[in-house]
Image (spheres, rainbow, N blue to C red):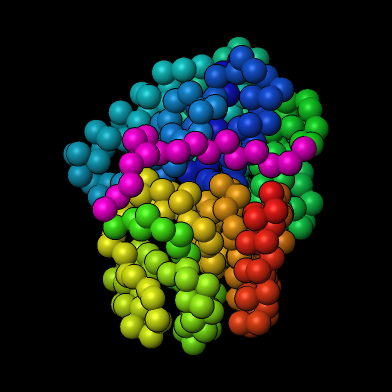
Amino acid sequence: MNILIVRVSSLGDVVHNMPMVADIRRHYPDANIDWVVEEAYTSLVRLNPHVRKIIPIALRRWRKSLGSAATRAEIAAFYRQLRHEAYDVVFDTQGLLKTSVVMRMARLAPGGKRVGLANATEGSGYEPLSRIFHTQSVPVGLHTHAVLRARTVAAVALGYAPDGAADFSLGAPTPDNSPGWLPQHPYAVFFHGTARAAKQWAPEHWVAVAQALHARNLPVLLPWGNPKEKQAAEHLGALMPDATVLPALPLTEAVTLVRRAALVVGLDTGLTHIAAAYCRPTVELYCDSPRWKTEGNWSPFIANLGDTGQAPDVAQVLLAIDGVLSAQAAA
């Protein structure tokens, strides 16, 4: 059976689709599973050994230069690659018109079907018009976790129950070398940057946690993803007793950073969710987003704090750090 998954973005949502792949592989060991994903995230999907072929798409880049001959040539090449294989099932777990159009472009095998979401979950970007391209639309509960939502779509379409713990099946980047900036001693990572100001945590809180980790001889590494986040990292680093602002990191090095970390404390962002997917000791901070949608609920090494409009305080975070580190030490 040939299966295609269309989940192009964002980083956290791509991560949360991974257990769907493991479920399919467990119930259909001989299935060929391909994935259409934004070009920036291909290196992450490549870490999943259950995915046979990755088909990169560049919607974010193409829409800026649709009139150029080079862009049109790239789109034509993408279409040819998408149509090369005939698929028995094509899944669109994003539920947008643009992703359903990609689903429709894929070539079906005789008797094949296109499967997507029948409805939105609360606060999602779902577009009902996407259903016009479905052969089968799968309903999900209003408050269904992002991981379970994708697992449910696949399970209903393929005839099994989405049971068992979420299996992200993420391997190590190859080669899994240590970048020059990576410490050889234990360290913590703070994923402090987020696009929306309301989701940020107060700088003085980050500093207080860093001071507590300094007492544990656990230095802090501060990554960033854009100039504004770099400026924020430099500001935080100057106030912390033992912190290092990292250079710009490609996604594969960010994954290595996470995999080697003794502790990750982060906002509701893609890289924090990658840490949780690897079951590293992780404290997820929800300052202005609903925790139920993406919280790491599959491991005792993950703590989830806060909720929409209810940012956690420092004492809660320090207690959660004690909890996840103790859980790992006892494992």
The percent coordinates of residue 269 (x first, y second) are 52, 62
Relative placement, left or right, of 86 versus 323 is left
Relative placement, left or right, of 73 versus 52 is left
Q: Quadrant of the N terminus?
A: top right
The residue drawn where x is 51% and y is 58% is 262
Compared to residue 61, the image places residue 190 above or below, namely: below
Q: Can residue 262 be seen in this view?
A: yes
**Viewer-proximal residue, 221 or 113?**
221
Q: Which residue lies furthest to the left in this view?
A: 69
Relative placement, left or right, of 272 versus 300 is left
Relative placement, left or right, of 257 versus 107 is left
The tally of labels here is 0
The residue drawn where x is 65% and y is 82% is 315
Magenta: main secondary structure: loop
**Residue 174 is a magenta residue:** yes
The percent coordinates of residue 295 (x first, y second) are 67, 59
Write down the quadrant of residue 121 in the picture: bottom right
Q: Can residue 38 be seen in this view?
A: no
**Viewer-proximal residue, 33 or 176?**
176
The percent coordinates of residue 239 (x first, y second) are 38, 85
Compared to residue 75, the image places residue 242 above or below, namely: below
Q: Which residue lies furthest to the top in this view?
A: 110
Which stretch appears magenta? 164-180
The percent coordinates of residue 32 (x first, y second) are 55, 19
The residue drawn where x is 41% and y is 31% is 55
Compared to residue 128, the image places residue 242 above or below, namely: below
The residue drawn where x is 71% and y is 45% is 148
**Residue 229 is a magenta residue:** no
